[in-house]
Image (cartoon, rainbow, N blue to C red):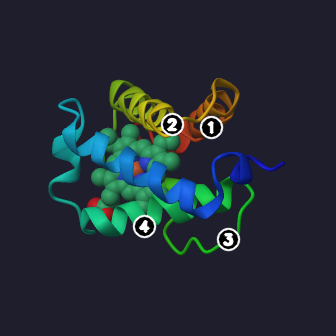
Amino acid sequence: MSLYERLGASEGIKAIANDIVENHLANTAIGPRFQNMKMTPDELKHAAAMFFIAGTGGPNDYQGRDMLAAHKGMNISALEFMAVLDDALLALAKNNIAQREQEEVLFILYSMRADIVLV
Ligand code: HEM
């Protein structure tokens, strides 16, 4: 079964993506980053869900920027990157995703580090 299916397919992943963005907004380490975005929080939730769905083996309907283009010039630190990973793991646990799938998601997210931190 694909990771996409094991995360609950599109409905499951939309719920996880919503929770990740809500966690970011409430996270004092990174919350301010999401106050003055070009997109609204709802648009970011949608983009995050489509990105996740495409990246885990579901249909590819992602129309946003690649990770380098989306984060270039933001001067994102290593600590901020870790805070985003923490928020993702919290959201996965909240949605009853098992440890093995949590680890697979963490590995995929971590692999994007070089396109996001200090770019
Ligand atoms: C693996 C980690 C990350 C992933 C997968 C990710 C994913 C995304 C995606 C899919 C978008 C939407 C791009 C678009 O629609 O064009 C986005 C935008 C954004 N990301 Fe990330 N991101 C990550 C890490 C971070 C970190 C560490 C920060 C800062 C704390 C951050 C801050 C933002 C902001 C502020 C936007 C909105 C940009 C704007 O429109 O102004 N992201 N991210």
Q: Residue at x 22, y 46 (%)?
A: 33
Q: Tell me the quadrant of the picture where the C terminus can be found.
A: top left
Secondary element at image label 2: helix
Q: Which residue is mark 1?
A: 105
User: Which residue is outermost to the front?
Assistant: 96
Secondary element at image label 3: loop
Q: Residues within 10 Å of mark 2 (few under 14, many from 20)?
A: many
The residue nearer to you, when weighing 43 against 76, is 43
Q: Are marks 2 and 4 in contact (CB under 8 Å)?
A: no
Q: Which mark is residue 60?
A: 3
- Residue 56 falls left or right of residue 110: right
Instruction: Give the alpha-carbon distance from disc 2 to disc 3, as whole Å.
Output: 21 Å
Please determine whether, in this image, residue 64 is positioned above or below residue 108: below
Q: Which mark is residue 92?
A: 2
Instruction: Give the alpha-carbon distance from disc 3 to disc 1, as whole Å.
Output: 17 Å
Q: Residues within 10 Å of mark 1 (few under 14, many from 20)?
A: many
Pointer 2 residue Cβ closer than 8 Å to ligand 1: no
Pointer 1 residue Cβ closer than 8 Å to ligand 1: no
Q: Are marks 2 and 1 in contact (CB under 8 Å)?
A: yes
N-terminal-most mark, 2 or 4: 4
Instruction: Give the alpha-carbon distance from disc 4 to disc 3, as whole Å.
Output: 13 Å
* x and y, in percent, of residue 21 in the image: 34, 49
Disc 2 residue type?
A: Leu
